[in-house]
Image (cartoon, rainbow, N blue to C red):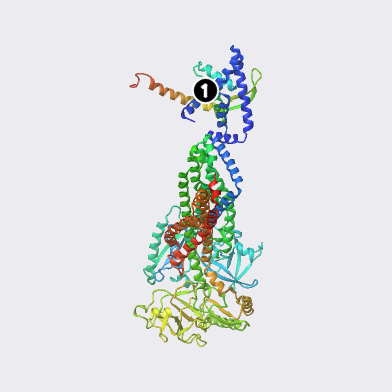
Amino acid sequence: MGERAEVWQGTLALMVLKTLQALRPLHGYGIARRIEQTSGDLLAVNYGTLYPALLKLEQEGYVSSEWGTSDNHRKAKYYKLTRAGRKQLEKETREWEQTTEILARFLAPGKESA
Amino acid sequence: MRKTRAWLLRFEGLFRKARQDRDFSVEMESHLQMHIEDNLRAGMSPAEAYRQALIKLGGIEQTKEIYRDRRGLPLLETLFQDLRFAFRMLRKNPGFTAVAALTLALGIGANTAIFSIVNAMVLRPLPYKDSARIVAFHTKTAMFPNFTLALTWPAFQEVRSQATMLEETAAFWATDRTLTGVDQPEVLRATGVSSGFFEELGGYAQQGRLLSEQDHQPGQNRVAVISDALWRTRFATDSGVIGRKLILDKEVYTIVGVAAKGFAFPERSEIWLPLSLTSEIEQNQKFFRFQVLGRLRKGERLETLQAELATIAQRIAKLDPALGKGYKLSAEPLLESRVHDARQSYLVLLAAATFVLLIACANLTSLLMARSWGRNREMAVRAALGASPGRLQRQGLVESCLLALLGGAVGIALAAGIVQVFRAIAPSGTPRLAEITPDWTLLWFALASSLVSGVVFGLAPARRAARMAPSDALKEGTAGSVTGTSRFGNALVVVEVALAFILLIGSTLMMQTLAHLLHQNPGFRSARLLTFDLPQPPQWNREDSDANATGQIVRLKDMLARVRRLPGVEDVVASDHGILDGMMYEHSGLQLEGALPEQSAVTESVIGRYISPEYFRMLGISLVRGREFAEQDQQGAQRVVMVNEAMARKYWGTLDIVGKRMSVSTDGKGTPQWNEIVGVVANARDVEIQDEATPEFYLALFQWGVGSHHLIVRTQANPDALAGTISRQIWAGYPDQPVRHVMTLTETIAESVGDQRMHTVLLGVFAGVGLMLALLGVYGVVSYSVARRTQEIGVRMALGAARADVLHMVLRQGLTLVAFGAVIGSVAALGAVRVIASELYGVKSSDPWTFSGSAALILIVGCLACWIPARRAMRVDPIVALRYE
């Protein structure tokens, strides 16, 4: 598990949590599609990587899952946010905002002196 | 917290693989279908829709693989795989597994057993309240600079009132008391205790109560607390024991309580009584009989207490100038004071057991090394198929650790057995013997030492297996690596032999010590002797009047007459101490008439024994000058004394001293009370068998009447048969007289060397096991090298080497290793045995005979170990050997 994967998985987890907060509950395929749509198709998610991330979130207790039936009567696993997940989402959102803010200061041209 | 939860779930995931795999397949399937349907809706052809969905998913199998890794614990899973594989390998070679496991079991078993003994004895805190803070006190005086004494009552009172570092203090005095009125009279280990004794140790009663402040008031103190053991044996667990009367030395005590099970302080004490002292003893500045305990205040250091004690001692010495400058008080932790003699010898045993384990490990390393050659191909194939070196090494280590655990399991059983045997054979005075039980520490220690040794002996073979390049290995064994490995194997054997040699030297020295002790000529005729202890009421409440002494003397004379009358008794004499029981009064402040100028007032203490007439004739100790005590030396007659040669030579420089006088005591005004020297006798070891001839003098028992009596009986035939008869004969006339320690002299001698005997036995067993393992190692390495050199030997023989040459070649190889080991071992042993030098007797730690004998032994046995492979090499048929491979 390289460092890049870790970072990537972190952001992916945040996206998953955010998605589940808006539309709950949702199956894996739905989450993947939703992330793509939200990103304005700028992100090409490899759908396969989503499942280990979901499993990790579930093991950590941020999401829970149960079997259900999809719109077209297919058996599918539905994921939804837990209470702990909601808190984690808030926390990660705050952290992420902070990170981006700091990065933005670095990247904004000519503002070093301010 | 979240992480832990995740780990737990992943751990659980290990066990529900099949179901979870199925679930995930279903989830993947529905994902794919949904995607395909979406793609179809977007207008793709069915084939294209399917293809795009798969691409987007990134490959079903890879996804499943990543998912699986996340679900379980991959590291643990490979560990399980390795374990399963290791199990299969061990099952496939039951012979190898059994030999390896047993080898280890010997090492681990020995270690674990000794460790649990050391742990119980030396390391584990004593079973008393805050025992780490309890300290014991000692006195040192100018008179006995080499001895630590207990405290006097006034010193105890000073410490109790003045030492601010202490929370609680208590004094006790262990003495034997005679219980009468129930069955036969019996001597109990009684302890007179001051107030605060039970509080100090945190003892409590299982029935009734312990001693209270009230019990220590004069006139209130005829009460007793009995031990759980005494309650079970003597009182048959009588529930109404509280309130029962006990007759101790003709005084009636009331039992007020039974101490908690397991409370035994001082060790093996059976009964606790309030100390009641005469006012003389309460004032006496030279009666060093009171053991004192104190509890350090929390956070205070022992050093601070020592400083405080120094001040207290100065004050006491000032009050009584007779105590002099050398008077010192000191404190040490209670545990320390109880085990310091034992610690050293048990650490030696622990070291010996560690040697055995090291030898076992070295053996296993070479076994595994040898075996790994047989598995070259297997390893190469696995490496070629992509197993990383790390993985191969891990596999090897898992295998060796599994083997070690197997050995450890057998070792635990062995250790539990050794501990039981130890308890059975340990001399009764061994400190904390009752606390030595197989417990969890033993289990943990065995587990830990198994895993450590698994890594120790497995690391080198595992690294070798992992390092090997597959291309090399797939070719048949290449010459270069063979020599490298065999050099390592040879080094291992040398180390093994060296370790075994050190053990051999140590145990040989101990055995010689024991033999010297057992066959020491004691300087008297020791055949068919029985000794009887006839305990008397203790000094602390006996009236030391002349009338009392007369009564005792009459009584003792009558007992002697009664015993002498018995058929089968050849002769009987009396003394204040037994023979070879290691106990004797040491007298100080002797004054000698006509002695060498610098010796007229003796500053050191000298051993003195009280004896009945004819003592020397009966024991066969020859009279050198003058006469022996006789009937005429009675109370009221001129007091007489005899000395041994050592004393006469040391203090007078001559044996012709009959008629001179010496004094052992003074009257109230400090005037010496003179005794006339009537005879000089040869030196005899009648106190301790280890003793070199020490100065000793003899006083006439019938002129003094003293506090302890022993009968020494010589029988006409087998002494064991007569012991019971003699006891009954004494009881017939004196039903309240306890009779104890009925032992033959052989038993007495055996008991006096009990500690050495046990250490020798254990060390001997370790040395034997170590030697055996080391020779197995020699055998293994030599036969392995013969097997690998079959072809070479065949060539040599084809080129004309005789069978004898081959035999020599192999023997030479093996014996070189053994000789190397012996040389290194003897150098190391010279240093190592210094730690047991203090336990040796009659043999020096660098004894050349021991060293050369041990070397010869190890070479001879080494020869035997090489013999079998050497003969195998000799029988190699050149034709077959050359066709080999």
Q: x and y percent of residue A48 in the render?
A: 55, 24
> Which of B37 and B285 lies nearest the eye of the viewer?
B37
Quadrant of the frame with the C terminus of chain B: top right
Q: Residue furthest left?
A: A113
Q: Residue furthest top?
A: B43
Which chain hosts label 1? Answer: A
Q: x and y percent of residue B227 in the render?
A: 59, 63
Drawn side of residue B110 relative to residue A114, left or right: right
From what the image shows, is residue B103 above or below residue B739? above
Q: Which residue is mark 1?
A: A15
Q: Secondary structure at mark 1?
A: helix
Q: Residues within 10 Å of mark 1 (few under 14, many from 20)?
A: many
From what the image shows, is residue B458 above or below residue B643? above
From what the image shows, is residue B739 above or below residue B797? below
Q: Amino acid at mark 1?
A: Met
Q: x and y percent of residue B405 in the render?
A: 56, 48
> Which of B55 and B483 lies nearest the eye of the viewer?
B483
